[in-house]
Amino acid sequence: NNILERYFDELNDLEKEFSHDKEHPPVSNSSLPTSGAIEWADILYQQGKKPMIQFSKCENLISSSVGKEAKERYLAFARNVDQYKNDLVNTWVSRAHEVLKELCNPILASKVNNQTSSENQIVSNDFSKSSHD
């Protein structure tokens, strides 16, 4: 159980780091903000997951009351990190859609206006030809 107590300490540190830095995660200069934040969160997630995978290989350890508690705490942490990553992706997708709408609307509007005026010209030309016949 000493190893699980150490894991609790490590998990506490991961939870504190996640809570403290999630609003402004440490992102490398070569990363974009959203992808860098997701990468940072995934690193924390993996640091919590790797020991739990090892513990799950030892049935006596993980089936003890302390082992079950460790598993529950890890799962709660993992769910929080997953939710954070999903929220980042959803926010990014929403923003991307808004930017695309703003960028594409003038282009589409001008294409529709050009197409409409061209079609009107064709129609009026056709009518003018038929009215002279």
Image (cartoon, rainbow, N blue to C red):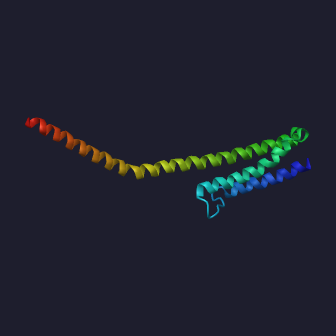
Image quadrant assignment for residue 23: bottom right
The extreme left residue here reads 132
Q: Nearer the viewer, residue 69 or 125?
A: 125
Q: Nearer the viewer, residue 117 or 89?
A: 117
Image quadrant assignment for residue 120: top left
In this rendering, the answer to whether 11 lies above or below 129 is below
The extreme front residue here reads 133
Q: Nearer the viewer, residue 117 or 95?
A: 117
Specify whether 95 is left or right of 4: left
- Which percent across, then down, holds residue 14? 75, 54
In this rendering, the answer to whether 101 lies above or below 59 is below
Q: Nearer the viewer, residue 49 or 10?
A: 49
Counting labels gives 0
Q: Image point 69% across, 46% down: which residue?
A: 80
Specify whether 77 is left or right of 106: right
Specify whether 95 is left or right of 9: left
- Which percent across, then down, holds residue 98? 46, 49
Image quadrant assignment for residue 55: top right
Please identify the quadrant where the C terminus is shown.
top left
- Which percent across, then down, holds residue 76? 74, 44
Q: Image point 70% across, 54% down: which residue?
A: 18
Q: Image point 62% across, 46% down: which residue?
A: 86
- Which percent across, then down, holds residue 124? 17, 41
Q: Image point 69% across, 48% down: which residue?
A: 81
In this rendering, the answer to whether 2 lies above or below 122 is below
